[in-house]
């Protein structure tokens, strides 16, 4: 039995490039470890390279972010036409299972640990069910990831998740849409995963690379007591590790000291904005703008490189603020952020629900692929859509210009090296030089009219029984109509976690908002010619968690 595990990706800058510097997605190695030993498994990280279209699979497990859905359903159709059964998991599948169901043989709602074993068992006996619902998070069900199946498709061979979820409820985050939760597991199992990963990859990767670990958690510092215990357990391992944390942890001297002593040399922090009105609108109280420079200096003084992302808020930012961002970057000493994106209302999030209730809040004919964070889908409040795009593209060209990036390295790397922190200096240099984002004159950056992604799945005429069937797979999914109103399929979304991460009762994810989906409205033609398309996990402005 051959099982393929594909984490779907499309270049959100619409140039058709892979993103090999991304530490995500990492669900593939975990899902592979949930398969029976008699299964031949293959992990495909689409952010690293395309799937091998000549491969034969019996069962294909697919995960994607919302903006990747077009490519995910095309990949599903490709292998279904070649005899495979396909299953979709991930945040979109969990939020909108009915919308996803027509394009896959089954949909998995929630975490992989309690769904994948049942999916495989049912498939083996020819009784695959249309939907699978995860039970409550149980750390005892988490196996050691199959690092040996994924290491060749990622920069840091030992990359995995130590915790799950985030205790905060940022309005734009897909995790909030599914239900706020934060789960930990015994630190002994995390140490087990690291040591087992080193054994799995011994001889496959140089020994010194196996001392580097990337934790792909949404927020590894979600529980300070757990973080203290984890740092104590990691310190004897003498590894170098990176992770994502929230501002309150990265700005706290005690937690920074403990992380540095245990080998932390890089932290991603969702800085999001220097505009207090934008942070308030995002419901992100943990960020304190006045302490940003202090947070960055604190981390660097302990040999930790900080890479942080920014978002422009269409509803809170005006021209004066956008024009001042380079000055804010310099004064904060961040200098060059990991990314500058556009705050995007991912369907299913509180931000999306809030804008859906407002008239003319979203741009007309916005497509699901436009909700990636790098295409404007929200009508700006303080300037026109064209003016915001012009300010945005000018900003990224200024911030990511080569002289600006070299200036950042010159200001930071020597100090890190002088302190003996070669690992942080190396990460700083690689991260800064690798961030070569420039604006693209061939794009409109506007939802509904932006250039189609060039990625394609090699589907042929023989893969479709009719022109209508072809259109159903190849036409992009739409979110708004020609007036900017939300289409019916997006009115009902699922919320699967309640208080303290409890799984909500019911046969489906608990519905939020009313509405009835009409299948005939799930697609819309764009204003520009179409090609098959997609998008996936990355340093995202709206983080979508590591679900099946």
Image (tube, rainbow, N blue to C red):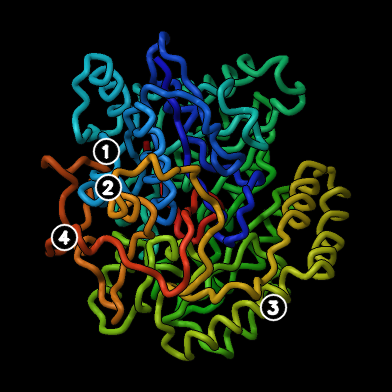
Task: Find out whether the residues at labels 4 and 2 contact each other: C-beta distance under 8 Å.
Answer: no
Vertical position of residue 37 compared to residue 266: above or below = above
Q: CA distance from mark 4 to mark 2?
A: 12 Å
Q: CA distance from mark 3 to mark 1?
A: 44 Å
Q: Label 1: few (<14), some or many (≥20) within 10 Å?
A: many
Mark 2, residue position: 100
- Which residue appears at 39% of the width and 54% of the height? 474
Q: Secondary structure at mark 2?
A: helix
Percent from the top left, x then y, of residue 109? 26, 40
Percent from the top left, x then y, of residue 503? 21, 40
Percent from the top left, x then y, of residue 482? 30, 79
**Comes first in the chain, label 1 or label 2:** 2
Q: Secondary structure at mark 1?
A: strand
Mark 1, residue position: 107
**Comes first in the chain, label 4 or label 2:** 2
Disc on res. 326: 3
Q: CA distance from mark 1 to mark 2?
A: 7 Å
Residue 202 visible: yes
Work out which quarter of the rendered image holds the N terminus and state it.
top left
Percent from the top left, x then y, of residue 98? 20, 48
Task: Find out whether the residues at labels 1 and 2 contact each other: C-beta distance under 8 Å.
Answer: yes
- Which residue appears at 15% of the width and 43% of the height? 508
Work out which quarter of the rendered image holds the C terminus and state it.
top left
The residue closer to the viewer here, 196 or 261, is 196
Q: Nearer the viewer, mark 3 or mark 1?
A: 1
- Which residue appears at 30% of the width and 72% of the height? 480
Q: Nearer the viewer, mark 3 or mark 4?
A: 4
The residue closer to the viewer here, 33 or 528, is 528
Q: CA distance from mark 3 to mark 4?
A: 44 Å
């Amino acid at each position: 039995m051959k099982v393929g595990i594909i984490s779907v990706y499309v270049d959100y800058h619409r140039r058709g490039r892979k993103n090999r510097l991304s530490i995500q997605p990492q669900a593939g190695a975990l899902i592979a470890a949930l398969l029976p030993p008699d299964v031949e498994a293959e992990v495909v990280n689409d952010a690293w390279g395309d799937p091998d279209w000549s491969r034969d699979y019996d069962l294909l497990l697919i995960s994607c972010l919302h903006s990747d859905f077009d490519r995910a359903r095309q990949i599903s159709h490709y292998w279904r036409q070649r005899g495979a059964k396909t299953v979709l998991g991930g945040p979109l599948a969990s939020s909108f299972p009915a919308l996803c169901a027509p394009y896959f043989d089954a949909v998995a709602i929630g975490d992989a640990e309690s769904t994948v074993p049942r999916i495989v068992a049912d498939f083996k006996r020819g009784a695959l069910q249309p939907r699978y619902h995860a039970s409550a998070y149980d750390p005892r069900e988490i196996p050691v990831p199959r690092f040996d199946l994924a290491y060749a498709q990622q920069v840091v061979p030992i990359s995995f998740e130590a915790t799950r979820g985030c205790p905060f409820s940022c309005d734009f985050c897909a995790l909030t849409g599914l239900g706020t939760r934060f789960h930990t597991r015994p630190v002994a199992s995390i140490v087990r995963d690291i040591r087992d990963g080193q054994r799995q990859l011994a001889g496959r990767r140089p020994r010194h690379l196996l001392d580097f670990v990337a934790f792909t958690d949404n927020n590894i510092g979600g529980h300070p007591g757990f973080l203290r215990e984890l740092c104590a357990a990691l310190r004897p391992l003498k590894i170098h590790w990176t992770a994502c944390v929230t501002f309150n942890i990265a700005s706290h001297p005690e937690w920074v000291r403990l992380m540095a002593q245990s080998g932390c040399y890089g932290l991603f922090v969702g800085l999001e904005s220097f505009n207090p009105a934008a942070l308030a609108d995002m419901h992100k109280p943990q960020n304190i703008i006045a302490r940003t420079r202090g947070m960055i200096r604190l981390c660097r003084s302990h040999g930790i490189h900080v890479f942080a992302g920014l978002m422009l808020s269409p509803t809170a930012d005006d021209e004066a603020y956008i024009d001042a961002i380079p000055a804010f970057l310099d004064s904060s000493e961040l200098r060059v952020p990991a990314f500058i994106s556009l705050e995007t209302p991912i369907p299913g999030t509180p931000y999306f629900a809030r804008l859906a209730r407002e008239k003319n809040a979203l741009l007309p004919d916005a497509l699901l692929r436009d909700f990636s964070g790098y295409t404007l889908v929200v009508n700006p409040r303080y300037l026109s859509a064209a003016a915001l795009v012009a300010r945005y593209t000018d900003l990224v060209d200024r911030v990511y210009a080569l002289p600006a990036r070299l200036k950042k390295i010159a200001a930071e790397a020597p100090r890190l090296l002088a302190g003996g922190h070669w690992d942080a200096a190396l990460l700083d240099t690689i991260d800064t030089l690798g961030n070569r984002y420039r604006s693209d004159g061939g794009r409109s950056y506007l939802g509904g009219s932006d250039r189609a992604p060039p990625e394609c799945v090699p589907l042929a005429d023989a893969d479709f029984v009719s022109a209508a069937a072809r259109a159903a797979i190849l036409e992009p999914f739409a979110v708004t109509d020609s007036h900017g109103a939300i289409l019916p399929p997006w009115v009902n979304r699922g919320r699967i976690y309640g208080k303290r991460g409890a799984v909500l009762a019911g046969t489906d994810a608990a519905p939020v908002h009313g509405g009835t989906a009409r299948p005939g409205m799930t697609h819309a033609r764009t204003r520009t010619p179409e090609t098959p398309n997609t998008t996936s996990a990355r340093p995202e402005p709206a983080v979508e968690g590591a679900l099946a």
